[in-house]
């Protein structure tokens, strides 16, 4: 498809997605065959599956206009990061390293210590950062990830999709002309 023909500004517009780290995601389950949506077998996704889905949205790979050299991704708001789920002994055995290039300055901390010190949002941010392409767009994409420890966040009015349901119809009309068109169609 040519991007020269037609209106492409709408394709490059950024939407806001909301993901809760504590609720099950039907599309990220590993149970086969898929259970019903209200099944108690569904669990919240693990850190890796959640991070890979977020990285896909931040890169814009879910859009038909995706191009690796352009930044066409969306915003992602993640809530309840304090309830991230990991499997096995990763919470105690996974190590995070940092070094400031000076001799003897290697520092390490495990995932449990990182969660106590900075919270689950930092653990998620590091996981997503590792899954983004290592290029000049990485910092800009990572800046569109907004992670919060609890349910409260200041971006509630920005979120267009929540659980796949569009909230656009609930927004008030932007102008009197739009309001009269809505009333006329009703």
Image: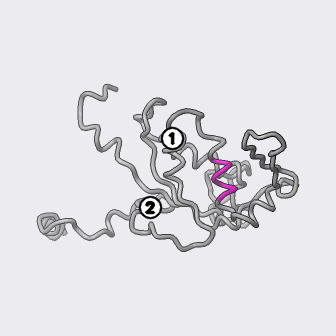
Depth check: 159 or 27 in front? 159
The residue nearer to you, when weighing 127 against 37, is 127
* In this picture, residue 94 sits left or right of residue 101: right
Q: Main secondary structure of the magenta part?
A: helix
Q: Which residue appears at 31% of the width and 68% of the height?
A: 171
Q: Quadrant of the N terminus?
A: top left
- The boundaries of the magenta stretch are 122-128
| Few, some or many residues within 10 Å of mark 2 (<14, 14–19, 20+) | few
How far across and down, in percent of the image, does residue 88 sit?
86, 54
Magenta segment: does it hold 133?
Answer: no
Residue 154, disc:
none
In the rendered image, which residue does mark 2 sit on?
A: 165
Q: Compare marks 2 and 1 and give the one earlier in the sequence.
A: 1
Element type where label 1 sits in the image:
helix
Task: Give the quadrant of the C terminus.
Answer: bottom left
User: Would residue 126 be counted in the magenta stretch?
Assistant: yes
Query: Percent from the top left, x then y, of residue 13?
Result: 34, 47
């Amino acid at each position: 498809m040519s991007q020269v023909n037609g209106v492409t500004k709408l394709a490059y517009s950024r939407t806001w997605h909301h993901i809760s780290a504590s609720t099950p995601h039907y599309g990220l389950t590993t149970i086969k065959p898929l259970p019903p949506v209200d099944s108690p077998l569904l669990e919240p996704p693990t850190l890796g599956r959640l991070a890979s889905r977020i990285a896909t949205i931040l890169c814009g790979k879910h859009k038909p206009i995706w191009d690796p050299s352009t930044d066409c991704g969306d915003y992602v708001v993640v809530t309840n990061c304090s309830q991230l789920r990991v499997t096995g002994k990763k919470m105690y055995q996974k190590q995070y390293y940092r070094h400031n290039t000076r001799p003897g300055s290697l520092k390490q901390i495990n995932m449990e210590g990182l969660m106590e010190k900075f919270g689950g949002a930092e653990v998620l941010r590091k996981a997503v950062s590792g899954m983004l392409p290592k290029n000049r767009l990485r910092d800009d994409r990572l800046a569109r990830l907004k992670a919060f420890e609890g349910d409260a966040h200041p971006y509630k009015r920005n979120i267009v999709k929540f659980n796949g349901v569009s909230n656009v119809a609930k927004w008030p009309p932007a102008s009197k002309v739009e309001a009269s068109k809505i009333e006329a169609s009703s």
